[in-house]
Structure formats: structure tokens, C-alpha cells
Amino acid sequence: AQSVAQPEDQVNVAEGNPLTVKCTYSVSGNPYLFWYVQYPNRGLQFLLKYITGDNLVKGSYGFEAEFNKSQTSFHLKKPSALVSDSALYFCAVRDLNNAGNMLTFGGGTRLMVKP
Amino acid sequence: DTAVSQTPKYLVTQMGNDKSIKCEQNLGHDTMYWYKQDSKKFLKIMFSYNNKELIINETVPNRFSPKSPDKAHLNLHINSLELGDSAVYFCASSQRRTEVRSYEQYFGPGTRLTVT
């Protein structure tokens, strides 16, 4: 069975500083990995994905993530945080063999960016 | 020009009632999903529906049933509502057909269900 872990419930960072939101995964085959962001009282918005190719993927709003197969990690990063980045972030994985294209989500990490 | 829409946004009802939540996508996607987000913000897949192929998460009670009148709609019907069904329910869609596969899912704004 596939699983995703986000070890930090909350990450605090000052505006302008770099941020990292951690994610590790477990799948039986090659993973498809995703990051989503959820603003208060809103649905999830797709940020970026890793399917194949370069380990560093770039996404929306200046976010990027690095796929590390040996560490089974897919950490989300941004060089300079904005107050408006404050939201709930979800990492998700889909096993290549997963019927139905269903995603398994991590528990979410709340990012707080302070001015 | 909302991509994935859900109605209603809020739903308050009593235990034992039957209710439905509607979902529509105008992205031309061939697969739709329902997710449940509990009070701790944990997201769990409930169903995946593609071209009449329904895949059910085995933990979902059979009181929950998805109904798809056409490719653009996947409604969620819930029978005999229980207190524990209170949550935010999200609909999503994606494109699975090989030649135009995009993998990522697009989510609706959610329906907050409160069972009293």
C-alpha cells in the first residue's frame, strides 16, 4: 500500500527566508508525486508534480520540489517566502500500478510566514 | 468559468437523513473523484470513477454511493447520515486517457457537511 508522511504539522518562517516543507513516501513501484496547497475555506490547488525526468521540478508561485529516490523524499522548497504563502500544504503520491488513479495524501503541513 | 464546481457549499442536516452533493467539471476530464477531509484536515480518497468504472476505497461505508449521469458529473449520495459523516467533501477530476494524460487532479471548492 502506498503512503505519504509529512513529519511537520507546522513550519514557521520569516518573510524573505527560504522555506522547506518535508515529504517522504512509500510505494511499491515508481511514484508519481504531487504538491497541493489549500487556502482557508478553499479547495486544493495543484502546485507541481514529479512523473519522470529531472529530479528538480518547478511549479506555480515560485515553488519547486526535489525528488530523491534513495531517500524516498519529495520536499517542497521556495527560495524566498511571502506572507501570502501561508496556507496548508499537502504532499500526495500515486503508485504507477494504482488502479483508479487515486492519490494518497499526507497529513498536511501548515506553513506560517511572518512579516 | 469554474473548472470543478460543487453544490451546495454548506449542508446542515440531521442524523438519519439522506442527502446528495453535486459535482460538475467543465475540463473535459474522463475521471472524477470524491475525497473526504476530516476536522484534522486529513484527506482521504473515497471513490474514483472513470467511464463507468467505479473504484471504491474499501473503508468507505456502503451508505455512500457515487452517481454519474454523464462524464461531466459525479454526485455523491449519502444514506442514513451519521454524526461521523460531518466533514468537508471535495470533488476532483483528472484526465486518464493515455494520449492526453496529465495525472494531476483539479479540485472543487468543497462542501462542508454538518450532521446534527
Image (cartoon, coloured by chain):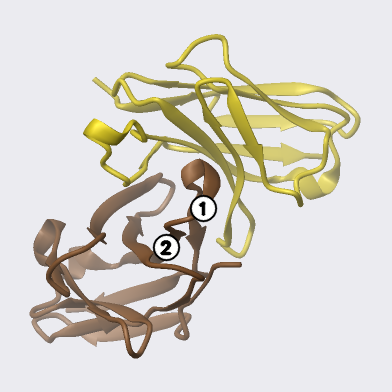
Chain colours: A brown, B yellow
| Residue for point 42% across, 62% down | A92
As displayed, is residue B69 above or below residue B85? above
Chain hosting mark 1: A
Mark 1 crowd level (few <14, some 14–19, many ≥20, 10 Å Cα): some
Q: Residue furthest top?
A: B69
**Could you tell me residue A95's position as x and y percent?**
46, 60
As displayed, is residue A101 above or below residue A86? above
- Which of the marked residues, 2 or 1, is nearer the chain's N terminus? 2
- Observer-nearest of B46 and A86: B46
As displayed, is residue B67 above or below residue A21? above
Residue A92, label in figure: 2
Q: In which quarter of the image is residue A12?
A: bottom left
Q: Left of A80 or right of it: where is B46? A: right
> In the picture, which quadrant includes the C terminus of chain A?
bottom left
| Residue for point 48% across, 80% down | A9
| Residue for point 78% across, 39% down | B115
Q: Which of marks 2 and 1 is in front?
A: 1
As displayed, is residue A19 above or below residue A106? below
Residue A98, label in figure: 1
Mark 2 belongs to which amino acid? Answer: Ala
Q: Quadrant of residue B8?
A: top right
Q: Distance between the residues labelled 2 and 1?
A: 13 Å
| Residue for point 47% across, 31% down | B32
Chain hosting mark 2: A
Q: Left of B80 or right of it: where is B73? A: left
Mark 2 crowd level (few <14, some 14–19, many ≥20, 10 Å Cα): many
Mark 1 belongs to which amino acid? Answer: Asn
Q: Residue furthest bottom?
A: A71
**Could you tell me residue A18's position as x and y percent?**
14, 85
> Number of callouts in the render?
2
Residue A56, label in figure: none
